[in-house]
Image (cartoon, coloured by chain):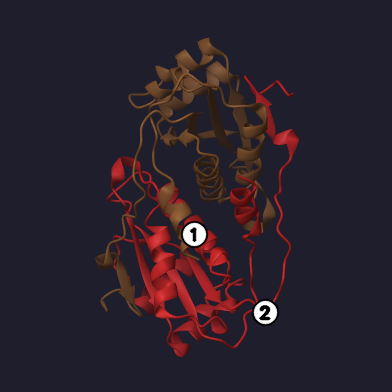
Chain colours: A red, B brown
């Protein structure tokens, strides 16, 4: 078991990437992991845009205060959700994003979740750049690359956030 | 690598449980995994209620059309989020829930995500039962037990949901 947990703890937000490629096969593996996430009523309200073009990545890097990593990562995976398809699109697409990040860690790639939703200005910028139809929302950007920073595995476990039987009770 | 993906694909929604315990140590492992999820600005807007009491689980089983599994699972982990703490509480708590489900699969436990948010009636029922303060929302219930059904690993990968460079482009 400890292997399982180790692997979850190994996923860290990696924002610095080496000048080295991420293969199409690796990207497909990440997307296979993402789409293995559960979704309410099995609706799978997600879609993904895989961006490799340098100019587009430069533009994504300027979309948001915290999206500058998109310029240096060889690939950015953009996670979309369809609210018309499901009330639970944020949950489902978030679970898919977490699977993607964990699979990246499993491949010894570095990746990070850059939130776009619910910031309307950022979302409009991504929508225009990637020609995303109105029915889809832009949940997040995930730049992926070969890691050029090292972070130790960790959890942010806090016993104070665990309640027993009712909210007022602690162990 | 294939190990990593295999393990993500192994997570399935398990709704039938054997009459066998889940230990406190296992629950702590699940919560350590959950709290290893990323959160926007490292705010960690989550909290968890661990419910073992049979009467409470019976009540949770009646809260929702799809929550009946709570009666038979020896433990139900309830995932809460604090919107006052973060705009991104649904995303963060969803990533934490996915980590929890993956850790359960890693422990050879069975678990399933029972959505509560944004169903106001269900949420009110859980809130009253577990004495949850108004500032927290109830994202979901996760019944956990020893699995008494077997499901094969799988992804729901669909190439049609992958777009290249812009939304209109496919491979």
Residue B3, numbered circle: 1
Q: Residue furthest top?
A: B55
Residue B48 position within the rendered picture, expressed as x and y whole percent measured from the top left: 61, 33
Q: Residues within 10 Å of mark 1 (few under 14, many from 20)?
A: few
Same chain shared by disc 2 and disc 1: no
Between residue B22 and residue B28, name the one nearer to us.
B22
Residue B150 position within the rendered picture, expressed as x and y whole percent measured from the top left: 35, 36
Q: Residues within 10 Å of mark 2 (few under 14, many from 20)?
A: some
Residue A154's place in the image compared with B20, above or below, is: below
Give the residue drawn at x 54%, y 78%.
A70
Q: Please state the chain letter of the residue tagged with numbered disc 1 in the rendered image.
A: B
Give the residue drawn at x 34%, y 42%.
A40
Residue B108 position within the rendered picture, expressed as x and y whole percent measured from the top left: 50, 38
How far separated are the C-alphas under marks 2 and 1?
Answer: 24 Å
Q: Quadrant of the C terminus of chain B?
A: bottom left
> Is residue A89 something one can see in this rendering?
yes
Give the residue drawn at x 68%, y 55%.
B42
Give the residue drawn at x 47%, y 23%.
B73
Residue B12's place in the image compared with B23, above or below, is: below
Q: Secondary structure at mark 1?
A: helix
Residue B140 position within the rendered picture, expressed as x and y whole percent measured from the top left: 48, 34
A117 relative position to A163: left or right: left
Mark toward the viewer: 2 or 1: 1
Residue A10's place in the image compared with B148, above or below, is: below
B10 relative position to A114: left or right: left
Q: Please state the chain letter of the residue tagged with numbered disc 2 in the rendered image.
A: A
């Amino acid at each position: 078991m400890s292997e399982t947990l180790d692997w979850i703890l190994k996923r860290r937000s990696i924002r610095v990437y080496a000048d080295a490629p991420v293969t199409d096969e690796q990207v497909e593996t990440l997307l296979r992991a993402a789409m293995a996430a559960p979704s309410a009523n099995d609706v799978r309200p997600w879609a993904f845009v895989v961006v490799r073009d340098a100019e587009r990545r430069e533009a994504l890097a300027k979309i948001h205060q915290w999206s500058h990593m998109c310029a240096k990562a060889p690939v950015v995976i953009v996670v979309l959700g369809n609210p018309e398809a499901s009330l639970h699109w944020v949950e489902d697409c978030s679970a898919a994003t977490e699977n993607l990040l964990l699979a990246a860690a499993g491949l010894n790639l570095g990746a990070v979740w850059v939130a776009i939703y619910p910031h309307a200005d950022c979302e409009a910028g991504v929508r225009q750049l990637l020609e995303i139809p109105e029915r889809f929302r832009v949940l997040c950007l995930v730049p992926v690359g070969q890691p050029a920073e090292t972070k130790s595995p960790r959890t942010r476990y806090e016993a104070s956030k665990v309640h027993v039987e009712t909210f007022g009770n602690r162990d």
